[in-house]
Amino acid sequence: MTKPDNPDLAAVAMETARVLTEALPHMQRYDDEIVVVKYGGHAMGDDTTARNFARDIVLLEQTAINPVVVHGGGPQIGQMLEKLGIKSEFKGGLRVTDEATVEVVEMVLCGSINKQIVGFINEQGGRAVGLCGKDGNMVKAKKVTRKIKDPGSKLEEFIDLGFVGEPVLVDTTVLDQILGRELIPVLAPVAAGIEGGTFNVNADTFAGAIAGALKAKRLLLLTDVPGVLDKSKKLIKELSLKDARKLVADGTISGGMIPKVETCFEALDQGVEGVVILDGKVQHAVLLELLTDLGAGTLIHR
């Protein structure tokens, strides 16, 4: 093989070698391991962003990593409800999923969004399979109730959120048949109830339950923030389970980050080696996190 005479080509070749040298040890670390990626509604962005994400997932599969994609779709559900003229009721800032709403949730998550992601992955050379928690009784859920504090009386009360559930049983039989066969499962967070019916499950919670059941090497929670921030609003690159709990207790981790971190705790308790919260809008965030020394978010580990 001849060496390039053009100094620019030589520089490109050297940079390529550097990137490969950095990536190869990470590829070996994740060889034949399972990585669950939660792809959030806000992280999906436009079609270009979605196609870049799909390409990254295909590259993971081609490097002998077994990716499992779990997607959300809150903004898209809200848009469809508005389009259909279905008014949403909110209690304590949380959407109540009534019978009409859960039908739309299932239609949007298991239909349009799921098949769009499957299509993007297949366009990029992958072989994606779209599923939801109801398929093969993969995920069974129970009804969720939430406790809120009345701002006037300061008394706590339980609120009924309708057809909102949380996973109680995960059967990996279907996923076991898919993984390791050059197929990429794409899962919508809709589950069957223990006593029948359909439940809308928070995508983070759903992804955590899937990752725990599969004993995944990594769970990546793609969101619209860089990760966990300290009190100076600087990114914390790595946290032990113990330190993360301290940050929740002292208020450093607050607001919408709390349920994400609680998902991390539950996944780690179930056997996941590490969970990363990262900004899904950053180009190639998944590859940067898994295959470079730099990483791309906050890693929480046992």
Image: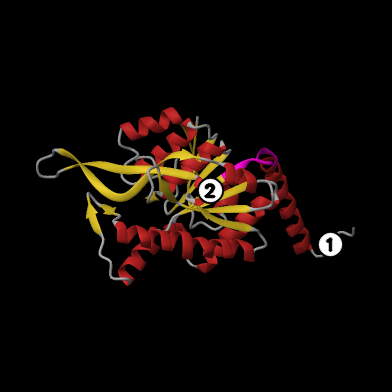
Vertical position of residue 198 compared to residue 263: above or below = below
- Magenta region: which residues? 28-35
Tag 1 secondary structure = loop
Q: Residue furthest top?
A: 242
Q: Is residue 30 magenta?
A: yes
Q: Earlier in the sequence, mark 2 or mark 1?
A: 1
Q: Name which residue type carries label 1.
A: Pro
If the image is split into quadrants, where does the N terminus sit? bottom right
Q: Quadrant of residue 74?
A: bottom left
Left of 182 or right of it: where is 194? left
Instruction: Tell me the tag on residue 4.
Output: 1
- At x 77%, y 63%, the residue is 9
Q: Position of residue 77 (x, y in %)?
A: 37, 62
The residue that disc 2 covers is: 136
Q: x and y percent of residue 237 in the render?
A: 49, 40
Q: Amino acid at mark 2?
A: Gly
